[in-house]
Image (cartoon, rainbow, N blue to C red):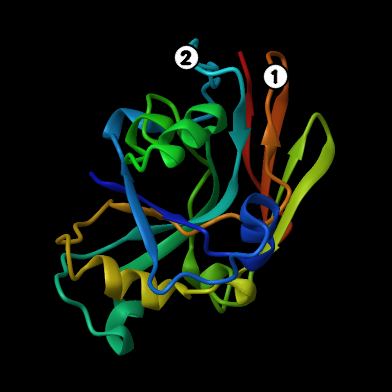
């Protein structure tokens, strides 16, 4: 199983991190190790190597069939379920890496950094580019996004990623985060919602 992340896919999030950056020339793709997957309500443990670990709430798409160099017009045939997830980011480490022009692997792909909720069939949620998702920390909503606001839609992402990687059944794509990212602390409780459905719930340790 492969886990793909998409950076800077929402304009408002780009503004809060980079001020003037609006849209990249192409999707920004990174990968997470398989050991990054956190599911079934297991707790997230803040790593010792970061002083600021941020939550990034995202729509997560599950690939349902083998594909390579997929035309965008056929991309919708290659995923069958979605959920809400959290792309955890060691923000202080990311800033150091960015300043030095180094890859993001260790600040994005560490163990437990890809939390996912319960997957629901795409047929139950409707148009993938017309979905609302949100994240609550300790009962207070801190992030809310709408997939219509993506710089690159899901079909574009599936097609683009498949140019470089063979997509296989079970692969996951974290499609980017809206504004409102922020640090988590020990004893926080995280809940995630997609179209009002409560799909994600776990504690921070």
Measured as percent of width and height from the top left, residue 147 is found at 60, 70
**Picture quadrant of residue 158:** bottom left
**Picture quadrant of residue 38:** top left
Q: Residue at x 31, y 60 (%)?
A: 63
Foreground of the two, 17 or 4? 17
Whole-Å distance between the Cαs marked 2 and 1? 14 Å
Question: What numbered label is drawn on residue 8?
Answer: none
| Label 2 packing within 10 angstroms: few (<14), some (14-19), many (20+) | few
Measured as percent of width and height from the top left, residue 10 is found at 60, 65
Whether 83 is drawn above or below 106: the answer is: below
Q: Residue at x 53, y 16 (%)?
A: 45
**Picture quadrant of residue 105:** top left
Which mark's residue is nearer the viewer, 2 or 1? 2
Foreground of the two, 205 or 13? 13
Residue at label 1?
Answer: 185
Residue at label 2?
Answer: 49
Q: Residue at x 41, y 74 (%)?
A: 25
Whether 80 is drawn above or below 101: the answer is: below
């Amino acid at each position: 199983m492969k886990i793909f992340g998409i950076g800077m896919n929402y304009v408002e999030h780009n503004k809060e991190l980079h001020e003037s950056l609006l849209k990249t020339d192409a999707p920004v793709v990174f990968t997470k190790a398989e050991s990054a997957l956190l599911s079934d309500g297991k707790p997230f443990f803040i790593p010792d190597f970061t002083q600021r670990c941020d939550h990034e709430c995202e729509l997560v798409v599950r690939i349902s069939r083998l594909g390579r160099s997929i035309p965008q017009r056929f991309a919708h045939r290659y995923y069958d379920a979605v959920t809400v997830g959290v792309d955890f980011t060691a923000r202080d480490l990311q800033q150091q890496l960015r300043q030095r022009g180094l890859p993001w692997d260790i600040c994005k792909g560490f163990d437990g950094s890809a939390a996912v909720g319960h997957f629901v069939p795409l047929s139950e949620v409707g148009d993938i580019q017309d979905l609302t998702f949100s994240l609550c920390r300790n009962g207070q909503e801190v992030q809310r996004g709408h997939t219509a606001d993506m710089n690159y839609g899901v079909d574009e992402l599936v097609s683009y990623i498949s140019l470089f990687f063979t997509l296989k059944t079970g692969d996951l794509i974290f499609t980017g985060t809206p504004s409102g990212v922020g640090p988590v602390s020990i004893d926080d409780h995280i809940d995630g919602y997609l179209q009002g459905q409560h799909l994600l719930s776990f504690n921070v340790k």
